[in-house]
Image (cartoon, helix red, strand yellow):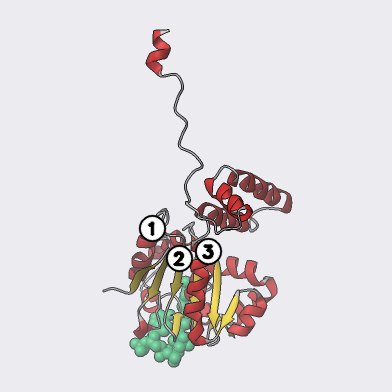
């Protein structure tokens, strides 16, 4: 059964979770149907951004509890339960989550694996696993804490309560709230904008911002400097600056600056001398 629609809109790939009868609860099929194609497209030169969405009622109401309930400690350990989602987090192309309705448990965690979350006014975020005798298991304790801070994360995870879109924006979980009907067009316009910048720079921006989670200030600043310097080797940086000086739009290619320089001396020539 197909639970995910993948569509190309210009340089943006729109992935829509489509399991409305279960409020888009995330089962193993959704994981493979979503993650495998997106991983395959990650290095595609014509793909500059990924937009992940659900339907108006639910982005995703969590991991599929019916599926979870079949597991034992041994099977969860043996199958590394839910770790398949880590491959989604590792996709390097910028990822946007456009959230309408419920983003609960694994749904909230999947949104947080994206680089930007946009929300509709009707969005509801929460980590209700405590009500099931569980804790978040797709990165929630770590990503939520980094995004909203320890105090708010503790409150959300320990009470299991939902927060609305306004609070999610106020807490720093959501970048922007849109009217329900404007969420998709606005998110797509933002995705399109990102997708048409140079992919090398966009990926470097994501990687460098994410480095802030894992490093102290001095190491983070050094990593930023080195990433920044590395971008000077790209044709896109040359093109971007040149276009500014020539007062025109840049035409980013995502290609390296030059082909590998040819050897001036061939091995046979070396042998002959
Ligand atoms: N797993 C499986 N099925 C789910 C589901 C989930 N996470 N969430 C909703 N559904 C199903 C319901 O079982 C129901 O199916 P049936 O019609 O076959 O009974 C259908 O979706 C509609 O749901 P409701 O009738 O419950 O709709 P509602 O409007 O009354 O309530 C809701 C909506 C408050 C979101 C409620 O469905 C709910 O609380 N869902 C569970 C949320 C949750 O606990 N999520 C965390 C899951 S665990 C997890 O994600 C672990 C992790 O960290 C990875």
Observer able to see residue 141: yes
Point out the tag, 3 or 2, that comes first from the N-terminus: 2
Observer-nearest residue: 176 or 188? 188
Which residue is label 1 attached to? Answer: 41
Tell me which residue sits at (43%, 13%) in the image.
270
Is residue 121 rendered to the left or right of residue 76?
right
> Closer to the camera: disc 3 or disc 2?
3
Query: How crowded is the residue under tag 2: few (<14 C-alpha within 10 Å), some, or many (20+)?
Result: many
Quadrant of ligand 1 in image: bottom left
Residue 161 location in percent, x, y?
Answer: 58, 84
> Closer to the camera: disc 3 or disc 1?
3
Q: CA distance from mark 3 to mark 2?
A: 10 Å
- CB of mark 2 within 8 Å of CB of mark 1? yes
Helix, strand or loop for disc 3: helix
Helix, strand or loop for disc 1: helix
Which residue is label 3 attached to? Answer: 194
Observer-nearest residue: 121 or 36? 121
Observer able to see residue 105: no
| Quarter of the image where one finds residue 265 | top left
Spot the residue most to the left.
1
């Amino acid at each position: 059964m197909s639970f995910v629609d993948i569509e190309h809109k210009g340089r943006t790939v729109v992935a829509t979770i489509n399991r409305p009868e279960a409020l888009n609860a995330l089962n193993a099929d959704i994981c493979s149907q979503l993650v495998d194609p997106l991983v395959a497209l990650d290095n595609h030169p014509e793909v500059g951004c990924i937009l992940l969405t659900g339907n108006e009622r639910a982005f995703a109401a969590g991991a599929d509890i019916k599926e979870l309930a079949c597991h034992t400690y041994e099977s969860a350990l043996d199958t590394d339960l839910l770790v398949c989602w880590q491959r989604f987090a590792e996709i390097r192309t910028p990822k946007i989550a456009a959230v309408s309705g419920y983003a609960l448990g694994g749904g909230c965690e999947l949104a947080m694996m994206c680089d930007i979350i946009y929300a509709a006014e009707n969005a509801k975020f929460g980590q209700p696993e405590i009500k099931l005798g569980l804790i978040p298991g797709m990165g929630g304790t770590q990503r939520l804490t980094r995004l909203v801070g320890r105090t708010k994360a503790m409150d959300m995870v320990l009470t299991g309560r939902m927060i609305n879109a306004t609070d999610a924006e106020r807490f720093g979980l959501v970048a922007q709230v849109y009217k329900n009907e404007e969420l998709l067009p606005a998110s797509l316009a933002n995705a399109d904008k990102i997708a048409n910048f140079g992919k090398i720079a966009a990926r470097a921006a994501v990687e460098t911002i994410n480095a802030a989670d894992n490093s102290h200030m001095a190491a983070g600043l050094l990593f930023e400097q080195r990433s920044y310097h590395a971008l000077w080797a790209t044709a896109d940086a040359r093109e971007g600056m040149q276009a500014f000086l020539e007062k025109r739009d840049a035409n980013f290619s995502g290609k390296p600056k030059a082909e590998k320089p040819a050897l001036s001396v061939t091995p046979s020539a070396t042998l002959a001398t």
